[in-house]
Image (tube, grey):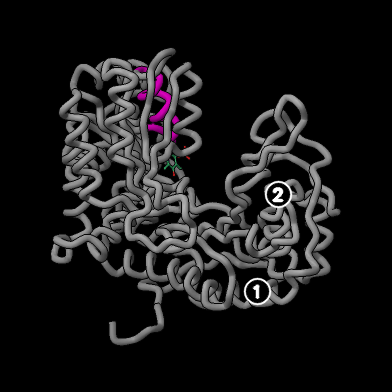
Amino acid sequence: MAFKTIIEPFKIKVIEPIKITTEEERQGYLKEAHYNLFGLKSEQVLIDFLTDSGTSAMSDNQWASLMLGDESYAGSKSWGRMRNTIHELTGYPHIFPTHQGRAAERIVYGKLGGKGKVFISNTHFDTTRANIEVTGAEAIDIPIPESKDTALVYPFKGNMDIGKLEELVKKHGKENIGAVILTVTNNSSGGQPVSMENAVSVGKICRNYGLLYLIDCCRIAENAYFIKHREPGYENMGYYEIAQKMFSLADGCIMSAKKDAIVNMGGFFALKDKDFADSCRETLIITEGYITYGGLSGRDMETIATGLQEVFDPDYLHYRIRSTAYLGNKLHEVGVPVMLPIGGHAVYVDAKKMYPNIPAEEYPGQALACELYLKGGIRSCEIGSVMMGHRDASGCFIAAPMELVRLAIPRRVYTQSHIEYVIEVFEKLKEDCGSVKGLKIIEEPRFLRHFTAKFERL
Ligand SMILES: *Cc1c(COP(=O)(O)O)cnc(C)c1O
């Protein structure tokens, strides 16, 4: 690239206004929301980095696809288009639509799970883990050790630990392994990529032991970008071909289309094995809908088909990964502690390092998320002791392993000037680091407390 400024490879045709608020106004909103950012109204937010899931902007082609939606109950033309697009990409013969990723997980892991079964992944995403554990099965994460060091720059920190995989298969017995799941990119571990070499090694072990190998492919296009630019031997291969090759190694995949299909709702799963597919089909019809729509409208299926083609556009992927990296690397330069290297869909800030004066039981991540909102109107997501900490039986506080704040970047939504603004806000936050206080929880539900807990400032 001759120029260093990243320009969005699109023009804006429809705009969604952002209401500019003052710090004073936000102080009131934050108090009303009990210092929990999930409690804010979206119009109270300037830059929404809560999640990249279902928050993408569709293209003119996708909006045009909506009008082509065939809403027939059976044999919809739009399903034909979505199925063919997925078949061409994945090579898998049996494809099923669902209303989102977790619905596909419930069907597939519901069949494979059960008491005594073990699932092994580089890292199970939280809905994946929940859908496995709810069947009584166990979900074991084996990311490579390099993934635990937030400051270590390593090209494929999303990889699975191959040595541990083999150990676990021997320990639990191959007949007890429900599936081996490779999550690309590794969402819960910083959006870090998985190398093709790792995907091949996982495949070899699965074939040797006769294990089912599934790819959680929510961000496979973003992962393909990293392979092309970081893994020797793939420099001259296209992103689409890299993704095809990765799919060819496994027995099936599950996708939340809310990520790399660049739509607001949808999902699917695809399988090689006919018998297994037959058994899933029944559950799909009972719980999601007929096999040619799952939980989706015809128009949704059209937009997914279009989005799955657009996401592999080199200009798009270049902009997507570079602009996320730009934000992360700039924050690093101005002295904000971030997880390195920067992943595909999000930047993770290490709140423990940013606010060393705030102990884990006073939630430094939540404090940072609140400051970001207060000073800049930016909504982020705490991934630390609010989300994963707890008290043991004796009431002793058990902290999460890390106190992170995630800035997840919606696809094609914000421009370079929004990103520059976020960097400026962080520079301001750096100046005031020492004066920020923690929070305490004054009310919390029994499960998933981060969504609804109420806080008070200390
Ligand atoms: C989002 C996500 C899911 C779940 O998909 P939903 O559409 O939110 O139900 C599963 N796995 C990964 C890696 C995800 O990022």
205 w.r.t. 454: above or below: above
Give how far apart the Cα atoms at labels 1 and 2 are: 24 Å
State the residue in front, 351 or 449: 351
- Coordinates of residue 430 in the picture (x, y in percent): 68, 73
Q: Quadrant of residue 171?
A: top left
Residue under numbered circle 2 = 360
Within 10 Å of disc 2 (Cα), the crowding (few <14, some 14-19, many 20+) is many
In this rendered view, identify the residue nearer to me: 407 or 121: 121
Residue at 49% x, 67% y is: 14
**Kind of element beneath mark 1:** helix
Residue marked by disc 1: 425
Asked if 189 appears above or below 239 in the picture, the reply is above
Where disc 2 sits, the SS reads helix
Q: Residue at x 39, y 30 (%)?
A: 104
Q: Over which residues does the magenta segment extend? A: 98-111
Q: Residue furthest top?
A: 115
Answer with left or right where residue 151 lies relative to residue 84.
right
Quarter occupied by the C terminus: bottom right
Q: Which residue sits at x=72%, y=39%? A: 452
Q: Residues within 10 Å of mark 1 (few under 14, many from 20)?
A: some
Residues at marks 1 and 2 touching, judged by CB atoms closer than 8 Å? no
> What predominant SS class does the magenta segment belong to?
helix
Q: Is mark 1 within 8 Å of ligand 1?
A: no
Quadrant assignment for ligand 1: top left
Q: Where residue 124 sits in the image (x, y, percent)? A: 43, 36
Q: Is residue 124 magenta?
A: no
Tell me the quarter of the image containing the N terminus: bottom left
Please, what is the three-letter code of the amino acid marked with disc 1?
Val
